Amino acid sequence: MKMYNKIIVIIPAFNEDATIEEVIGSVKPYANEIIVVDDGSSDSTSLKAKEAGAVVVRNEKNSGYESAIESGFKKALQGGADVFVTFDADGQHNAEDIKKMADLIINGKADLVLGQRPRRFVHFSERIFAFYTNMRFGIKDPLCGLKAYSVKVYQDVGYFDRIGSIGTQLMIQAKMRNFKLLTIPVYVNPRKDSSRFYFKNLKANYKIFLALLKTILYSAKLV
């Protein structure tokens, strides 16, 4: 069995200069490399990420979560990653969970490890999304940003997300292709600032419902 030896953490960030340095510092003990994808920030996110020791991929325009993660995955693949871990820039994730997830992949127990948050979902739309993916795929928290992927999952599928599903397409493809998926509970810290994604409840629910519709239509084609 091949032993994985390079864990690369991908952090998408949009105007997260208030938290990015602390997040990178917390992740360093658990990653061989950290890639921050600055998705068109107007603040000093890129500068602070570089100063903190991350590799920075800069998008001149804000292209969205899925595109940012895709850019990070491509960079990580070029860097020889064996395990990709997605990690939010807002300080809500616990970096210690990275090791738990990566170890499950390194030890051959999983190809993809999904984080499951302990708190109740912020939005009604998240509950509906989770209800659907749980009934359809047995996935209880599809929108948790903390996930770990074996490189072979990404290479087999060939992309992260092409339908705008808030980062769930690769996960669904992995499930349909019979890769081993595991879910573990992950800790969630309270945000130190207001969430840009949940800034307006109506807008957030709209985004999630739209992503859910795209996911349902996409999943129907997989039957």
Image (cartoon, grey):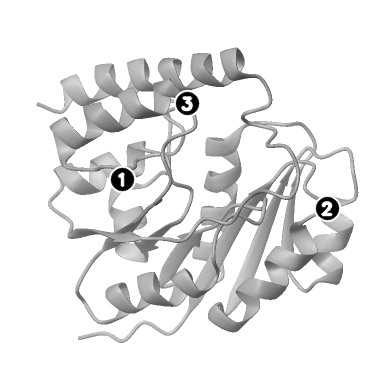
Residue at the (26%, 85%) spot, across then down: 2
Residue of label 1: 171
Q: What x and y, as percent, mark residue 166?
A: 46, 33
- The amino acid pointed to by label 1 is Met
Q: Secondary structure at mark 3?
A: loop
Q: Nearer the viewer, mark 2 or mark 1?
A: 2
Q: Earlier in the sequence, mark 3 or mark 1?
A: 3
Q: Name the side, left or right, on which 57 lies relative to 140.
A: right
- The amino acid pointed to by label 2 is Ala
Q: Secondary structure at mark 2?
A: loop
Residue at the (64%, 78%) spot, across then down: 28
Q: Which mark is residue 123?
A: 3
- The amino acid pointed to by label 3 is His
Residue at the (46%, 22%) spot, across then down: 208
Q: Which quarter of the figure has residue 101? A: bottom left
Q: Which mark is residue 18?
A: 2
Q: Nearer the viewer, mark 2 or mark 3?
A: 3
Could you give the CA–CA distance between mark 3 and mark 1, rounded to whole angstroms? Answer: 21 Å
